Image (cartoon, rainbow, N blue to C red):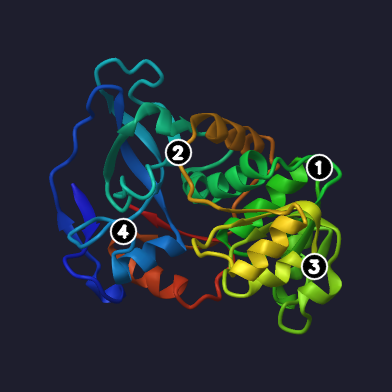
Amino acid sequence: MRAVTQDVLGGPDVLRVAEVARPEPGPTEVLVRVRAAGVNPTDWKHRANGGLIGAPPFTLGWDVSGVVEAVGLGTTLYQPGDEVFGMLRYPQAHGAYAEYVTAPARTFARKPSEIDHVQAGALPLAALTAWQALVDTAGVRGGQRVLVHAAAGGVGHLAVQIAKARGAYVIGTASAAKHDLLRGLGADELVDYRSTDFANVVRNVDMVLDTMGGDYGSRSLRTLRDGGTIVSLVLSKLDPALAEEASARGIRTAAMLVEPDHAAMKAIAALAAAGRLSAKIAAVFPLEEAAKAHELGETGHTTGKIILTP
């Protein structure tokens, strides 16, 4: 089968398509023919520095939408021909930039017939991240106020929709050019981070989703009510003085990594099928143009998700 591989760390030019052995499903696993693979910021970061997966050679990618080709011993959830989508175990089980992948059957959910593979391939990692931050970690519920940073980004624009589906009042930070898009996704209030310091204008928030890191965490504390929650997707420690302030005010601070979750994938599938959750597609590239996909993503100016199609 064809797969995008790299032998050294570096820029997008290290990515190349090679012929590799097709994997075989083990017990309770499925073999999926990939129809679409999502590209995420974590992909180009790992390409450049190895990150959590170490030194190459390796094949990147965690988002998959495709068709079950074969099932392993003991697998009852799916049969060959079933359309599924899901996220390979992060960070260990990378490899979505390929024609086939294997993974435990419960990594996947059935792809809703209402969406195509490109749309489905854009959802898993980013939507699971948003779901696990908003729902599982912060317990967002109707009537609460949620602040989403980088609200037009891959995770951000899905978090806006999930928070709205939970009945929350959603505030987003994004450049002014992206405000109309975000209003269309349900955002109630928007702050142009280029002209306004959100920490000066946002108050009484129940939950902050910090996708940015840096000083966003400390500034976000000023927006939170006592007893609120800030969930960071950037694995960095809060300044001790700020952590002490958060603790004194009963504010929970949490840093999380996304993980496979069959129940959450089914919930995401239900939202997508109902038209309440959709990914903005920034661009679609063939597998052979993975380097171009990374180049585009690293500009930092895309809205939504980039997709590879084997």
Q: Which mark is residue 195?
A: none
Task: Read off the residue under disc 4.
Answer: 287
Q: Could you tell me the amino acid type at mark 3?
A: Leu
Task: Read off the residue under disc 2.
Answer: 260
Q: Earlier in the sequence, mark 4 or mark 2?
A: 2
Q: Earlier in the sequence, mark 3 or mark 4?
A: 3
Quarter location, residue 194: bottom right
Q: Could you tell me the amino acid type at mark 4?
A: Leu
Between circles 2 and 3, the one closer to the viewer is: 2
Task: Read off the residue under disc 1.
Answer: 167
Q: Secondary structure at mark 4?
A: helix
For the residues labelled 3 and 1, the Cα–Cα distance comes to: 17 Å
For the residues labelled 3 and 4, the Cα–Cα distance comes to: 36 Å
Q: Nearer the viewer, residue 108 or 283?
A: 108
Q: Earlier in the sequence, mark 2 or mark 3?
A: 3
Between circles 3 and 4, the one closer to the viewer is: 3
Pointers 2 and 3 in contact (C-beta within 8 Å): no
Residue 156 to residue 135: above or below: below
